[in-house]
Amino acid sequence: MDRLNFCMKPALALSLFVAIVVGAAWAQERPYFVTYSHEMEEPGNLEIEVFNAVGKPPAGNRFLGSNIEFEYGATAWWTSEFYLDGQITQHDSTIFTGYRWENRFRPLLREYWINPVIYVEFENTSADKALREVVGHDGRDDFLESNAAARLEKERELELKLILGSNYHGWNISENIIAEKNLASEPWEFGYAVGASRPLKLAASAHSCTFCGQKFQGGVEMYGGLGDRHSFGTRLTSHYLGPLINWAAPNGMTLSFSPQFGLNDYSLPRLYRFGVSYEIDQLFSRFHRGAQ
Amino acid sequence: MIRRLSLTLLLVLAPGAVVFGGADGSWMKNVPARDHEKVSPYHNQGDAIAAGRRIFVDRCSHCHGEDAEGTKKRPPLTSDRVQHQASEGDLHWLLVNGNMRRGMPSWSRLPDQQLWQVISYLKSLRP
């Protein structure tokens, strides 16, 4: 609890301060929680996102896994993102579970039918329950350990993703292939995520509106593990599928929600995901202008 | 010695030439003829211009200025190049593909309809 206070509260306070001091951009993101699209953060923009997953393993305690993310568009082809993770488990404790730093690079500088993005992440976590990806033989038994026991296992991991994305007639279709290596000499683990989404209305309204179709995006995503180097495949691991919806609120926030369903006995039966994101346009230019 | 100096200069200047080579609108040379000839389905429609203005303010004005007049680092969109030299199809191609070396992101995330609405607005700025 003390570590959560120490790390997460300053991060939340900083996010609120930045959000209040500087203005927001209207930026409706794709509604995915796990799948990455090929779309990069706009250069100079900072997006602050909070994503949560609520679940309950059978015979286990209900939990809330959270990330706070700071996503910065370094260039039009490079996005960098820093995460702080935490979780709360009912009848157990609230803990800070670690951090991640990821970078996404777009090697092809034009739009094609299929657009690749290279994703590289280093993470240092333990007892993480945010479920931002499923790899290897991840399953619901992982959620039965007490936080005290789970925290003993430090996961310093390198995660690579090949993100493939296409935009066609308003639809976005994204596929992620994941390879993750625990640096403590464990085998490579694999996973996947796929998603499709589109705005409810394609043309924008000429009039100001809050709940019109262009402000909502709907979709579906599916993700799961693919075993490891010694036992590759879709068996003995978990898979999830769920519909997605998000709404671009008028003040620059985007709210997202998804009920997700486990597809086999290794998965949690249900997960409820919700998120809030807030985009600050041209962050450093604003500070520069403010100084003049 | 001179050869080595020339090589060093070439190595130093070449990346700059690549980065700044697009500043004069050279992106237009990359637009395929098929894209160049595309015409906005919303050409000169008042509602589309109004909707395009809204999208522009939300998405583009941070870099290109509230009235597309440009900012310190980003070009104005009221220029002769955008208003007269570039066709609607050229602008659509630029919005879809971006000019990423020069910092212009791809806006393929927006549906085609919204891209054409933005183009209708931009072309309405013609003096």
Image: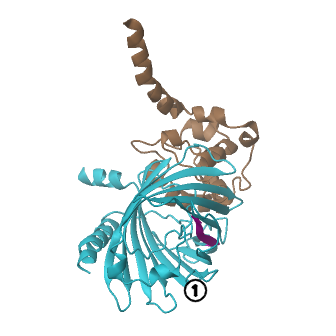
Q: What is the quadrant of residue B85 in the picture?
A: top right
- The colour with which the image depicts chain B is brown
Vertical placement of residue B127 versus B14, above or below: below
User: Who is closer to the viewer here, B24 or A198?
Assistant: A198
Q: Residue at x 27, y 55 (%)?
A: A290
Q: Residue at x 52, y 91 (%)?
A: A58
The percent coordinates of residue A194 (x first, y second) are 63, 65
Q: Is residue A219 magenta?
A: yes
The percent coordinates of residue A36 (x first, y second) are 55, 62
User: Who is closer to the viewer here, B3 or B41?
Assistant: B3
Q: Residue at x 47, y 83 (%)?
A: A54
Vertical placement of residue A160 versus A261, above or below: above
Residue carrying label 1: A269
The percent coordinates of residue B7 (x first, y second) are 43, 15
Tell me if A81 is positioned left or right of A167 in this view. Answer: left
- The colour with which the image depicts chain A is cyan
Q: Is residue B65 visible?
A: no
Tell me if A82 is positioned left or right of B108 in this view. Answer: left
Vertical placement of residue A140 versus B71, above or below: below
Say how many tags the image has: 1
Viewport quadrant of the N terminus of chain A: bottom left
Chain holding disc 1? A
Vertical placement of residue A88 versus A12, above or below: below
Q: Is residue A291 magenta?
A: no
The percent coordinates of residue B123 (x first, y second) are 62, 47
Q: Residue at x 63, y 81 (%)?
A: A264
Q: Is residue A89 visible?
A: yes
- Please provide the residue range marked out in magenta: A218-227
Give the residue type at disc 1. Pro
Q: Secondary structure at mark 1?
A: loop
